[in-house]
Image: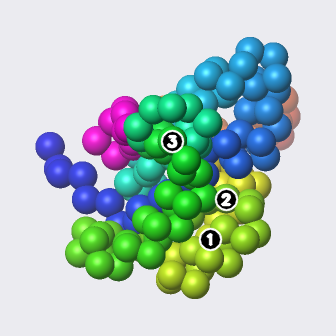
Amino acid sequence: MASFSPQAFLLVDGYNIIGSWTDLKKTRDQHGLEFARQDLVETLINYTVFKEFHTRIVFDAHYQKSPGYQENHTPSLSVHYTGYAQTADTYIERFSACFKNNHREAYSRLIVATSDNAQKLTVMGYGAEWLSAQRLESEVETTMKREHRKKKPPQKSKGRFLFNSLDEKSQKLLQQWIK
């Protein structure tokens, strides 16, 4: 089996994405934040594999009196919960600032997904690429559709003659003319 060698590191502002994507907002409002987080993780697991990214989703936990921690869901996707008194924004800014020194060997690009304008300007100042929540949603949908089409079995060949590609009515009409 080939080893996984991602080209880009995708850093996602989790709650910002949940608050921007229609389906995730519905899930959050109907079933709670935990379900919306899980839906985002599951969606990005598939996207990450198809795009060959390494992805980290960051969620605020600064109102909780607990240390930050990380959950590894797959070799290419992890979720980081910030510690007390740290926001996702500060985590993402610090990660972006240190990216060139700590991760440039492994990844050619850092992409930050958020629709927070101040966050956008800050991470771009550190050399990261920026992706809005809406653009990420669009790219996820496009990628999933493309991969779904690839998995469809190819249509059976009808033969090499033009006659075989005609509908049944046209075939009958053509046969009548030949007679």
Of the pair 65 and 56, the residue shown nearer to us:
65
Is-magenta flag for residue 77? yes
Helix or strand or loop: what does disc 1 sit on? strand
Of the pair 48 and 154, the residue shown nearer to us:
48
**Which class describes the residues within 10 Å of circle 1: few (<14), some (14-19), or many (20+)?**
many
Is-magenta flag for residue 81? no
> Which residue does the image show at 52% across and 76% down from the upper left?
128
Question: On the rendered structure, is 81 left or right of 104?
Answer: right
User: Is the Cβ of the residue at disc 1 closer than 8 Å to that at disc 2?
Assistant: yes
Residue 61 seen by the camera: yes
Tag 3 residue: 84
**Which class describes the residues within 10 Å of circle 3: few (<14), some (14-19), or many (20+)?**
some
Residue 159 seen by the camera: no
Helix or strand or loop: what does disc 2 sit on? loop
Q: Which residues are magenta?
A: 69-79
Vertical arrangement, residue 60 with respect to residue 172, above or below: below
User: Is label 1 or label 3 in front?
Assistant: 3
> Which residue does the image show at 66% across and 68% down from the upper left?
119
What main secondary structure does the magenta stretch of the protein show?
strand
